[in-house]
């Protein structure tokens, strides 16, 4: 808990590509958000870029990053983020999920991917907060919501739970020209997501494939959306204030909406 005795927030952030770190405005928004929250003892990261079944724990020591992107200038493959490992947090995750009959595996050589280290480099640039990344074991939203609920006690122990993805993620519809127009379907999907998250409407969120407008346009695939389900699950038993520290659109159709529960 923080100095006021409140649990750490649970958050979801839009992580962007490696180019995010060249976007001074976006970096400033993420850094200001981090500075406004209590400083975490550790970060538990769920990134859209690691799908593995069963739920798998990444490295608990500092290992090389995963540059899981292609065709970028060489300097993006030289970025470093040597955050400390979090072996004690890994053990707590095992304990919490074992109590819910969740199978947990280990991948001690698996470093942080760009969905993890890019936003963390903006938020905690000194790489001095221990980080543990865990995989997405499924795309099934109700299951992931329960995973988040299982991890919720970590918030009382000073751990910042982060889901990292994009609420909408249709790269074929992205328009990287200056001043792109946001299509109506993207604005409609973003407004729906903002309303559901603000109200912490669990039923709507876990049934988003059926209930969200324009979901087929917004999410041709679902790995970038479902980390928010884990984040909201971690806050389900302690409902409180919901904030949107970052909003707007990238490349016209990609919503940057990020959310803080608690």
Image (spheres, helix red, strand yellow):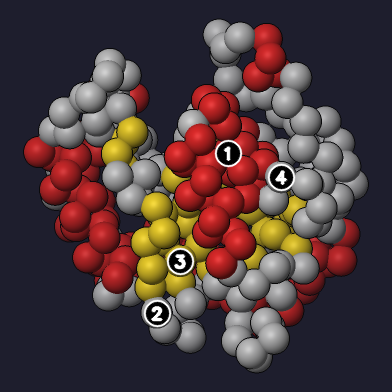
**Which numbered disc flags the more N-terminal residue, 2 or 1?**
1
| 89 left or right of 207 in image | right
Q: Which of the 4 quarters of the picture holds residue 71? A: top right
| 152 left or right of 238 in image | right
| 84 left or right of 28 in image | right
**Which numbered disc flags the more N-terminal residue, 3 or 1?**
1
**Which numbered disc flags the more N-terminal residue, 4 or 3?**
4
196 over 167 or under it: above or below: below
Check residue 125 in the rendering and tell me which mark sits there, or answer none: 4
| Callout in the foreground (4, 3) | 4
Q: Position of residue 136 (x, y in %)?
A: 57, 49
Residue 247 appears in view: yes
Contact (Cβ within 8 Å) of mark 3 with mark 1 = no
Looking at the image, which is closer to me, 106 or 49?
49
Distance from label 2 to label 4 (Cα)?
Answer: 27 Å
How many numbered marks are there?
4
| Callout in the foreground (2, 4) | 4
Distance from label 3 to label 2 (Cα)?
Answer: 8 Å
Residue 150 appears in view: no
79 over 33 or under it: above or below: above
Q: Position of residue 159 (x, y in %)?
A: 69, 69
Check residue 254 in the rendering and tell me which mark sits there, or answer none: none
Label 4: element kind = loop
Residue identified by numbered label 3:
260
Check residue 115 in the rendering and tell me which mark sits there, or answer none: 1
| Callout in the foreground (2, 1) | 2
Q: Position of residue 73 (x, y in %)?
A: 61, 9
Residue identified by numbered label 2:
241
Residue located 13% across and 33% down the image? 183
Residue located 53% across and 50% down the image? 30
């Amino acid at each position: 808990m923080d100095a006021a005795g409140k649990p750490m927030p649970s958050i979801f952030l839009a992580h962007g590509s490696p180019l995010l770190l060249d976007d001074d405005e976006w970096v400033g928004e993420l850094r200001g958000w981090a500075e406004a929250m209590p400083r975490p003892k550790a970060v538990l990261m769920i990134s859209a870029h690691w799908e593995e079944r069963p739920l798998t724990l990444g490295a608990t020591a500092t290992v090389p990053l995963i540059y899981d992107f292609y065709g970028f200038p060489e300097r993006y493959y030289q970025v470093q983020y040597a955050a400390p490992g979090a072996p004690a947090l890994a053990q707590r995750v095992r304990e919490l999920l074992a109590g819910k009959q969740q199978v947990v595996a280990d991948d001690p050589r698996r470093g942080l991917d760009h969905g993890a280290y890019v936003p963390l480099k903006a938020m905690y640039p000194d790489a001095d907060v221990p980080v543990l990344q865990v995989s997405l074991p499924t795309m099934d939203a109700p299951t992931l919501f329960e995973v988040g609920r299982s991890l919720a006690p970590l918030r009382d122990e000073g751990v910042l739970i982060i889901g990292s993805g994009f609420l909408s993620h249709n790269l074929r519809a992205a328009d990287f020209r200056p001043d792109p127009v946001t299509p109506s379907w993207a604005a409609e999907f973003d407004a729906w997501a903002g309303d559901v998250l603000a109200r912490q409407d669990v039923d709507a969120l876990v049934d988003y494939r059926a209930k969200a407008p324009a979901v087929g346009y917004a999410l041709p695939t679902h790995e970038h959306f479902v980390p928010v389900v884990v984040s909201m699950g971690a806050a389900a038993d302690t409902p409180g204030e919901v904030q949107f520290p970052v909003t707007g659109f990238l490349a016209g159709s990609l919503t940057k909406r990020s959310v803080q529960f608690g």
